[in-house]
Image: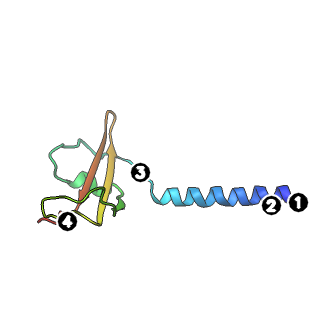
Amino acid sequence: MKKTGIVVMASLVALSTSAFAAEKTLVSTKAPGPIMLDGIADKAWEGAKALTVTLDQLPYEPSNGYPGMKKTDVSIKSLYDDKFVYFLISYKDPTK
């Protein structure tokens, strides 16, 4: 009976860990056509699912009077074609 309990607990931990990891997984979508590398998110990116990551750690304090980005939400999208994987990373620029 004790072994069964351990196996059940281990299974629950494994399932909960994989469920948490699935929430933070970036999925790359097949590109609908050619991707233009020009820094502009065109229509091709509309079909890609975004993964949002919150960055809230500042490794150092800038010495130029700017307080740095304390908390920033970063959106990441991915597309692929027969040759390459593309990433679109976007965030709000607090200086603009």
Dot 4 or dot 1: first in sequence order is: 1
Q: Nearer the viewer, mark 3 or mark 1?
A: 1
Question: Element under label 2?
Answer: helix
Question: Element under label 1?
Answer: loop
Callouts 2 and 1 close, C-beta under 8 Å: yes
Q: CA distance from mark 2 to mark 1?
A: 6 Å
Q: CA distance from mark 3 to mark 1?
A: 41 Å
User: Between 60 and 42, which is closer to the camera in this rendering?
Assistant: 60
* Residue, disc 1: 1
* Residue, disc 2: 5
Question: Element under label 3?
Answer: loop
* Relative side of 83 to 63, left or right: right
Dot 2 or dot 4: first in sequence order is: 2
Q: Nearer the viewer, mark 4 or mark 1?
A: 4
Q: Residue at (32%, 55%) from the top-left corner? A: 76
Q: Which mark is residue 67?
A: 4
Q: CA distance from mark 4 to mark 1?
A: 58 Å
Q: Nearer the viewer, mark 3 or mark 2?
A: 2
Residue type at the position of mark 1: Met
Residue type at the position of mark 4: Pro
Query: Could you say where residue 72 lies in the image, as x and y percent from the top left?
Result: 28, 64
